[in-house]
Image (tube, grey):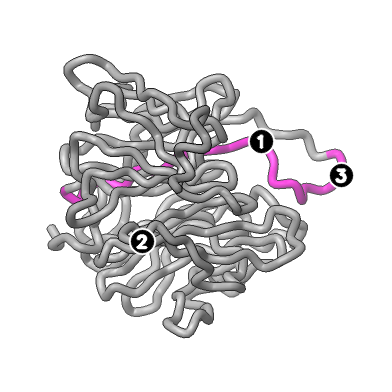
Amino acid sequence: MRLALLAAGLLLLAHSAAGQSPVPPGATLELLWNEGEFTEGVAVASDGTVYFSDIAIAGKNPGRIMKFVPATRQTTVYVSDSGQSNGLFFNTQGKLLAACGANHGHRALCEVRPDGSMQVLAGTYQGKRFNAPNDLVVHPRGWVYFSDPRYVGSEPLELDHQSVYRYDPSGQVHRATTDITKPNGLMLSPDARTLYVAETDNGATGVEPPGTPPRAPRYTLNAFAIQADGSLGPKRVLADFGTDGGIDGMTTDLQGNIYAAFRQPARKGILVFNREGKEIAHIPTEPLPTNCTFGVGPEAHVLYITAGSGLYRIGLKTRGYHPELSSAP
């Protein structure tokens, strides 16, 4: 029996801007699985299988990676010890990569091995451990951009900034930008020439020395031009969400629209922006959303969403962009 039929309250109508929206009239959100603790980092393999993280917020277990098969509608445990994996993304060789956070996690960019083990690809920058890698995106040229903020975990911070990094196929790690105070979700434009970065700065890391005053929160959506060598140009702010909350993970479609998990409680859901940063649609979710990505093949128009403790999907009018399956510019 479909879980969605048992959770009518979660089948919410998608609201949109007439004439511009990729959301069909009357489209509804379907609940696929709802037995997690904190779902995140949804990614789709070339065969259409959907993978997502289930993060252990209390740190009492190491987190896990789940697998959903659309043909059977079955969700099973793929990795039972993910080292607190958060964002997931397939690379150009079809290998699943994971941004593994703190709170007793690996604090590293990792590869998920076929046997379910986690292999650390990069765990330090200039000899200092990462804060808590959060999200990642793979460029068609093989570069892996990943964000390194800190939201949870009591481990001391070793780095002097919460930055975006670039991991090269050679194994080298470069600090890509420090122009974002606390980066989170990442995605590419469909021509792979722009990196989108969510600034999701709640004003604290949780491990500041006693008496440290919090920073003013800042929540923005930003764009960086990607140079020929993988370095980034100046920051361009596409949207400023104020101080009450912003976006988490995101994805894009082939038309260049940006789908972002928006976490302001009064307007939670997936916000859709055009490439200039103008909002063109809103897909409400009942729990706070964390991330989203499109399916592939026959499901290229299906948007998968992680929110709360579950996995959801909704059919749209557009097809998603997958840089790892695309030609390099």
Identified at 30% across, 19% down, the residue is 16
Tell which residue pokes out farthest to the front in this image: 1
Q: Is residue 137 left or right of residue 269?
A: left
Residue, disc 1: 203
Pointers 1 and 2 in contact (C-beta within 8 Å): no
Asked where in the image residue 130 lies, by quadrant, the reply is bottom right
Q: Which of marks 3 and 2 is in front?
A: 2
Q: What element carries label 3?
A: loop
Q: Between 46 and 28, which is closer to the camera in this rendering?
A: 28
Residue type at mark 2? Thr
Q: Give residue 237's position: percent from left, percent from top.
A: 37, 30
**Residue 257 percent coordinates (x, y):** 24, 35
Label 3 and label 1: CA atoms lie apart by 15 Å
Considering the image in quadrants, where does the C terminus appear?
bottom left
**Residue 210, label in figure:** 3
Amino acid on which the number 3 mark rests in the picture: Pro
Give SS at disc 1: loop
Identify the residue at image location x=60%, y=61%: 101
Number of residues whose C-alpha sits closer than 10 Å to that of mark 2, classed few (under 14), some (14–19) or many (20 or more): few
Answer with mark 3 or mark 2, whichever residue precedes in sequence.
Answer: 2
* Rendering quarter of residue 251: top left
What's drawn in magenta, residue-wise? Answer: 191-211
Label 3 crowding class (10 Å Cα cut-off): few <14, some 14-19, many 20+?
few
| Relative to 200, 324 lies left or right | left
Residue 258 on the magenta span: no
Q: Pointers 3 and 1 in contact (CB under 8 A)? A: no
Rendered position, 61 above or below 153 = below
Mark 2, residue position: 72
Residue 195 counted in the magenta span? yes
215 is higher (above) or lower (below) than 152: above
